[in-house]
């Protein structure tokens, strides 16, 4: 994803990336790809702010980041309808937190109700049937802009990692 993103942005990375983080391998992999591309001389040293988005019913990364911890604690009784975000303890949580901090990024949790409303909004405005994980990212972006934690004029990439068809039941 990191290589595709860099190519799509003509080798100048965006200002921020919001990624729905269950296990976190996408976020970690992109950060690693950016380091590799810089070593190859394909991009400069500018990096996007990496922003992890999780469900409020399973938010070990935002909690660990807020508490200044280097690793998360297992989230007990994890509950969210966004199955891709229902990961109580990511195996590489320490890498997720490392990369968020290195990028001056952030982590935010979104409730299931907010995800549902965001999915409806995206469908209405864009005609896309996104998964709740993708809807969480949209809701998080709006929240971060509204609270001044994300500059609205910056180049921001939001990842939708699936389709709403997986959640028809």
Image (cartoon, rainbow, N blue to C red):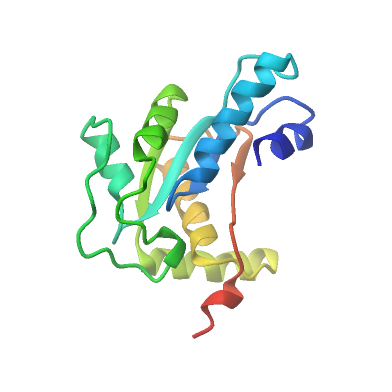
* Residue name at image x 34 percent, y 62 percent: 111
* Residue name at image x 73 percent, y 39 percent: 4
> Where, by quadrant of the figure, is residue 129 drawn?
bottom right
Q: On the rendered structure, is 121 left or right of 60?
A: right
Image coordinates for residue 15, horizontal then vertical, percent: 59, 29
Q: How many marks?
A: 0
Q: On the rendered structure, is 11 left or right of 39?
A: right
Image coordinates for residue 169, horizontal then vertical, percent: 49, 85
- Relative vertical location of residue 72 with respect to residue 136 in this rendering, above or below: above
Image coordinates for residue 17, horizontal then vertical, percent: 56, 38
Which residue ends up furthest to the front in the rendered image? 91
Q: Quadrant of the N terminus?
A: top right
> Where, by quadrant of the figure, is residue 45 drawn?
top right
Confirm whether residue 115 shows in the render: yes
* Residue name at image x 50 percent, y 36 percent: 28
- Relative vertical location of residue 63 with respect to residue 12 in this rendering, above or below: below
Image coordinates for residue 57, horizontal then vertical, percent: 29, 61
- Relative vertical location of residue 113 with respect to residue 30 in this rendering, above or below: below
Confirm whether residue 18 shows in the render: no
Which residue ends up furthest to the bottom in the rendered image? 169
* Residue name at image x 58 percent, y 35 percent: 30
């Amino acid at each position: 994803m990191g290589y595709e993103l860099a190519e799509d942005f003509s080798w100048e990375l965006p200002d921020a990336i919001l990624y729905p983080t269950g296990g976190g391998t996408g976020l970690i992999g992109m950060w690693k790809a950016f380091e590799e591309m810089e070593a190859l001389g394909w991009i400069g040293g500018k990096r996007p702010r990496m922003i992890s988005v999780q469900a409020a019913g399973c938010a070990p990364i935002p909690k660990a980041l807020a508490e200044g911890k280097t690793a998360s604690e297992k989230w007990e009784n994890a509950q969210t309808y966004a199955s891709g975000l229902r990961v109580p303890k990511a195996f590489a949580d320490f890498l997720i937190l490392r990369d968020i901090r290195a990028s001056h990024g952030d982590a935010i949790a979104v409730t299931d109700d907010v995800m549902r409303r965001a999915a409806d909004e995206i469908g209405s405005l864009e005609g896309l049937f996104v998964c709740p994980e993708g809807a969480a990212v949209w809701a998080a972006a709006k929240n971060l802009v509204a609270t001044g934690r994300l500059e609205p004029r910056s180049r921001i990439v939001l990842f939708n990692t699936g389709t709403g068809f997986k959640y028809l039941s």
